[in-house]
Image (cartoon, rainbow, N blue to C red):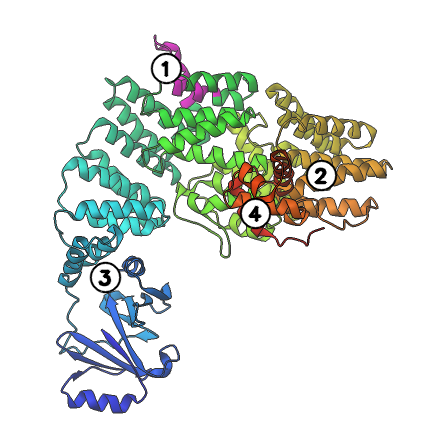
Amino acid sequence: MVTLGARDVPGLRRFYRALGWAELPGSDDGRVGFLLAGVLLVLRPAAKTDGATGGAMLTCTVTGPRQVDSACVAAVAAGATVLAEPADHPEGGRSACVADPEGNRWEIAWAPLARWRTEGGQAPPAAPATPAAPVPDEPHRASAELLHHHGASDEVVAAHLVAAGGNGPGWAVETLLCAARTARREGRPEQAVDFLRRALAEPLPPARRGGVLTELGSLEVTLGPADRALGVRHLAESVRLEQSDVSVFKAANALGTALAARGQTSVALEVMEELAERFTGHPELAWAVQVAAALIASHDGHSWLETVDRLRRLAATTPARPAPAVRVLLAEFDSTSGRLSAAEAAAVAREVTVEPLDPFSRTYVLASAATLAQWADELALADRLVTEGLTGHRGPLVDPGYQSLLSVHAESLVMRGRYRELLEACHGWGVLIGPPARPAPSGVGNAHLVAQAVIALTETGRAAEARRLADSIAVDGSHGSWEWNEFLYARGLLSLAEGDPAGALDDLSECGRGQSARQVTSPVVTPWRSAAADCQLLLGRPAAAVALATEELAAARRWGTPRCVGRALRALGTATGGRAGLATVEQAVALLRTAGTDPELIAALAAHGRLLAAAGHLTAARGALREAARYAERIGAGRWCAVVAALLAAAGARRATASQTGPPALTGSERRICALAAQGHSNPEIAALLHLALRTVETHLTNSFRKLGVRRRTELAGRLAAEPAVPDR
């Protein structure tokens, strides 16, 4: 199709009539169409072509909406410039516009029923007597051949293979699969799906076809409802194919996870039971199936408790020692139900991860062990286990063990107040932030990842974005799952920050009911009682607040970490008030100074300052609040910065004249040293360049890291660029 922006449509129309071109019925917007040998020529007023005064635009028609995106990616990879991003149109269809290196414009268009869009409107329909010929496959196939032999990228070649349809050359499958892996790695799952679907059109042996179906289905279940249903069918087909035991295990695992995410946990567990029967002669795989089933069962509280009981019976009746995956999973349950202390849980995490791990349950063991380590505040161990698990994972992304590893990593970042790092990782995890917020393809609707993003947005002072994200979460089959309880907790914290303690209390109480149904009593998972106590106090019910905080403190002491106990002491002291409350909060501050998790310490310091001010100790109050402000600025906790600033003003503090943290707080020397470090210079090189002692450089960098709230040199460039520097003092 060729579109001409005509300054004189009637005159140009007469010209093409005189050439003998077959004229098509006109349209209401003044456009005219001609047909010759399958070429469609569209004339329209130049004013409708981006304000141009004439000129031509070529149109490449494709056979589906996603192919618009694939073709656009291929064009850009080849050197084109995007003039209009791929977009849907109200009257149907999808199109994009690119320019080649010399500025010639190409529209890439799809419209239902082969009524191809042109820029600015629908192309006129062909006359019944002279229907437009369909776009042939051969040009795309020939282009794919040519580009392949000239060394074009896999994605560029694959885009033409998709457009061509049918069977391709012998190298087509590998090209399509490589392109799919690249698209998935770069966060374009829809294009990866297109490439994988096209690969299935090629002749494949059953085992290879099963692998493609597993990969395709695992991606499809992360997309919209229609794709999700198709993904379940593809995974089910993969399970039925003749494949190796390991391949069937991966496919069934992904299928079970997808079914559970849709609320079909009982069906998912039936799939895993059938799989367990198949693997009776393969002990390692049989245990891996049991653990995978347990993680799938966690989507439903009743199924989860039944599965834990079954694992206990199996462990008790099996002569050999239970597999590491079973031991660590039971330790998870015992930790949340108050049967284990933090020290005991951490010992289990270390014990199971020093043993040789079979490849089938490795991801599950590392995920559960990392969870125990994180709960026990062994964050370095948790980080190491998460890294091992994520880098070594070879199965589908919907694998429950892989999703658990992501959850541990996300929660660990929130615990430390590394909100910026978490939010930067959200897109790759499948959580899109910004207007309009919506879950992105990935994560099988992992509500826990959304919960951590909501907390991070809330704490950084971006409550409006947090609310949009929270309102966008699709429930699907999440009710009864541990992820859903975590989401309720996060949404409760958001409502509390928004000044709605009643709404917050509703979510927090529902979280508590959900956790109790799962026999979760420890506050190490969701400390909902402490937050609910804050709500009760704001609602004028101090007795209820004290009761909740007292219950949480008892459970926290059974667990025994400073973070857990300190948080509960802060809630109890705040609810109690007076001299007794002040003494309790002082204990909380002392404990939390040893925990290494800044967010909890900030809350305790703020509570300490508030109670000191209420007791008339204004100087001490201002000291505690200023310390809280320094920590809040360091981690970018905008919400606490605002809260503490208000408390300082109420305590009679003068407004600070200079920031104590961030780039403005750097001295001229510190800024110069940081700039060189950000460029990759070592400390000795910086010392030589600035004629300073090495010890001086090290001291300046230490102070600068504290002021900037960074831990690694690689973070310096981004932090320095975040705010303008002040003139040298």
Which of the marked residues, 2 or 1, is nearer the chain's N terminus?
A: 1
Q: Name the residue type under label 3.
A: Thr
Which of the marked residues, 3 or 2, is nearer the chain's N terminus?
A: 3
In terms of secondary structure, where does tag 4 sit? helix
Q: Is residue 190 above or below residue 354?
A: below
> In the rendering, at what x and y percent does residue 453 appear?
52, 44
Which of the marked residues, 1 or 4, is nearer the chain's N terminus?
A: 1
Q: Is residue 1 above or below residue 418?
A: below
Question: How would you rate the neighbour count of disc 4 (Cα within 10 Å): few for under 14, some for 14-19, many for 20 or more?
Answer: some
Q: Is residue 276 above or below residue 428?
A: above
> In the rendering, at what x and y percent does residue 393 appear?
35, 32
Mark 3 lies on residue = 63
Work out whether residue 548 or residue 577 is closer to the camera in this orientation and state it.
577
Q: Taking 67 as reference, is 617 left or right? A: right
Task: State the count of labels.
Answer: 4
Q: Name the residue type under label 2.
A: Ala
Magenta part of the chain: 307-331
Which of the marked residues, 4 or 3, is nearer the chain's N terminus?
A: 3
Mark 1 lies on residue = 314
